[in-house]
Image (cartoon, grey):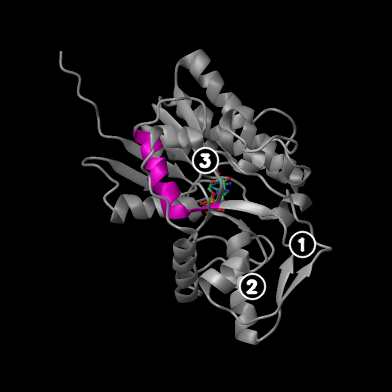
Amino acid sequence: SETKTEPMRVLVTGGSGLVGKAIEHMVKQEGGCLEGEQWTFLCSKEANLVDLQQTRAVFEKYRPTHVIHLAAKVGGLYLHMKENLNFLRDNLRINDNVLQTSHEMGVTKVVSCLSSCIFPDKTTYPIDESMIHNGPPHDSNFGYSHAKRMIDIQNRGYFEQHKHRYTAVIPTNVYGPYDNFNFENGHVLSALMHKTYAAKKEGTPLQVWGSGTPRRQFIYSLDVARLFLWVLREYDEIDPIILSGESNMVVVCVGGWSVNECVCVCVCVCFDTSKSDGQIKKTASNAKLRRYLPDFTFTPLSEGIKKTCDWFVNNYDIART
Ligand code: NDP
């Protein structure tokens, strides 16, 4: 008999965040949605996924065949250091509720989102996918990191016991429209854009927290979105895959991005070294991604920053500041 595959019904948890909005853009405006597919983008108002009943109810409502799981209690470095226990407990619950409900309702595939900050603090570089569990993560966000690591463990369990293909991606630092631009809780690049914007507007010095020496890799949110769609449709492994470009590593905070590449601000920069730096570097290897997608083109950092700055300035009223 002829077996007909049903078009996917995709539920995106965390659909209102930085990555969720980028996926929504790809799906709704860049032709990322195939005929017959249904895509639903959730926010916490529709279902608080810390709560099992609400999680079940929203899965009953949309009956997804596929899930992109982005929802997480997410914060900047300083909030993590203040609230490690809350980050651990909320994220453990959110992840277990989403994965177990997916299992109970027969979801075919789940793609969850880990983070490069979950890698061991003491490690050799570049870090790759095989090294996630080789030692404790950095102290500053141990709660969030351990909860994320458990997703990988759980994915292995669902495959071994139930043959489910639940997997995860590991993006490096994501930036783009709809990011959190808050000075204290925002991500580093977006918080810096906002600080630069404010310093320029008020003619005050640009106050940068930390020493300016840590190095990070950045990936533009629309690139993450394109890769998510590829993982959902094509990637068949349970083991996670790092999403990162090659050479977009910048010295954070020296103002290289702002002075040379972005807005040409004429402000004087001072570093507050009483504030923590976090890890000094955490270079992740994209060799596995390159084996699958040798020709994928990443948005250059200067172009991504320009687009994000433009979005921020034009959407200041709705931006998370
Ligand atoms: P955002 O902070 O921009 O968005 C978080 C999303 O999670 C929002 O949609 C939010 O909903 C939702 N959410 C939070 N708490 C709950 C809850 N209790 N119930 C339901 N939904 C909830 O995050 P990002 O888009 O930046 O991150 C998406 C994923 O990618 C996360 O898992 C994150 O850990 C991971 N990641 C992010 C990186 C980055 O640099 N941004 C790097 C690596 C990984 P609402 O808007 O309603 O609050």
> Is residue 163 or residue 254 the one in the foreground?
254
Secondary structure category for the residue under label 3? helix
Q: Does any portion of residue 268 appear in the rendered image?
A: yes
Q: Is residue 261 magenta?
A: no
* Quadrant of the drawing holding the C terminus: bottom right
**Spatial distance from mark 3 to mark 2, Cα to Cα?**
38 Å
Tell me where the magenta segment starts and ends, as one range.
Answer: 218-233
- Tell me the tag on residue 19: none
Q: Residue at x 59, y 79 (%)?
A: 265
- Mark 3, mark 1: which one is toward the viewer? 1
Question: Eyeballing the image, is 87 above or below 128?
Answer: below
Real-space Cα separation, disc 3 to disc 1, in angstroms:
43 Å
Q: Which residue is mark 2?
A: 195
Hey, what amino acid is under mark 3? Gln
The picture places residue 188, in percent across and down from the top left corner, at 63, 60
In reply to whether residue 220 is colored magenta, the answer given is yes
Which residue was labeled with disc 3?
54
Report the residue marked by disc 1: 211
Q: Residue furthest right?
A: 274
Image quarter of residue 198: bottom right
Image check: 136 left or right of 225? right
Q: Are marks 3 and 2 in contact (CB under 8 Å)?
A: no
Q: Position of residue 59 (x, y in %)?
A: 43, 36
Of badges 3 and 2, nearer the viewer stands 2
Q: Residues within 10 Å of mark 2 (few under 14, many from 20)?
A: some
251 up-or-down from 54: above or below:
below
Q: Position of residue 93 (x, y in %)?
A: 62, 36
Q: Earlier in the sequence, mark 1 or mark 2?
A: 2
Whether residue 17 appears in this view of the structure is: no
The three-letter amino acid code for the residue at tag 2 is Lys
Label 3 with label 1: CB-CB less than 8 Å: no
Query: SS of the residue at dot 2?
Result: helix
